[in-house]
Amino acid sequence: MSGPKVVVFGGGHGAAAALRAVRDYAGEVTGVVTVADDGGSSGRLRNALDVVAVGDLRRCLIALAAPNGSFDALFEHRFSAGTLEGHAVGNLVLAGLIELHGDLVTALDAAASMLGCVGRVLPSTSEPVVLRATTDDGEVTGQSAINRRADIRSVSLVPEAPGVPEEVLHAIDAADQIVLGPGSLFTSVLASLIPPRIVDAVRASNAQKVYVANLREQIPETLGRSLENHLQALDDHGVHPDLVIFDPSLGLQRGDVSIDVVEAPLSFDARPMHDPVRLAAIMSTLA
């Protein structure tokens, strides 16, 4: 398929929505996903196996999977009883592939092949990391704990300069468009962007940098923050979008924004979530 080379940064449901949008118009798609999650199935596997968090990686692989593939439903299935209760099968498969191949990127490429993915999913770091936040009350450690705070000033990683796969840097260097978000501002979007080598590569890239704004405040993580505040947080961490896609219909306030803003309806008619079809219709005209 001809089209631009697009790199999406983030994690969880937001990055998955962006990837579903991007796959409709991009010639080459790469998702760069945070692996700092420490809750749920991912957190349990981290503690048991000393692997990176795999849950967000799984969601993004499914977003790029072949339609009606053989393994989609299996990867998303969660056990409902016993010692495996709460684990997604895909998380266990990814953990097994990491152990089998001894390399995180190779494991993800193997999973992508199983799922018939149209693009590539890469981890933002090649080693387990812990997210750390500075808040009004001091330092808070761990994504799950940070996600419950409304007074986040900044985030960083432990270690502060973790290894970044060379494949991530190559994708950024080759990109025509870099998509930031949507998703949890501090614990997903910035968590995927703040490794120093990634920040430097994104800043040096000539690609168009697009921030896809959330539809509303995320309580409590971004309670009381406007679009202006979101962009200021990105700027404070060294990330400078060229323009933002924004849907104000669900209550997120705009504030004073100095970069170009493309306003458009982005949510499903019946659900307060980004509609990949609507998102693709806007993003494809910008690329």
Image (tube, rainbow, N blue to C red):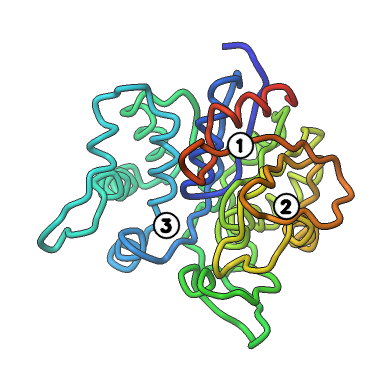
Q: Position of residue 90 (x, y in %)?
A: 29, 44
Q: Position of residue 47 (x, y in %)?
A: 32, 68
Image depth: mark 1 or mark 3 in front? 1
Cβ atoms under marks 1 and 2 closer than 8 Å = no
Q: Badge 3, how many Cα within 10 Å: few under 14, some, many 20+?
A: many
Q: Which residue is mark 2?
A: 199
> Which residue: 63% across, 35% down?
7
Of residues 138 and 211, the one drawn nearer to the viewer in this rendering? 211
Of residues 167 and 255, the one drawn nearer to the viewer in this rendering? 255
Q: Amino acid at mark 2?
A: Val
Element at label 1: loop
Q: Which residue is mark 3?
A: 52
Element at label 2: helix
> Which residue: 67% across, 55% down?
252
Q: Earlier in the sequence, mark 3 or mark 2?
A: 3
> Which residue: 24% across, 25% down?
70
Q: Position of residue 173 (x, y in %)?
A: 72, 34
Of residues 29 and 24, the one drawn nearer to the viewer in this rendering? 24
Residue 163 sits in which quadrant? Answer: bottom right
User: In the drawing, what numbered circle is on residue 266?
Assistant: 1
Q: Amino acid at mark 1?
A: Leu
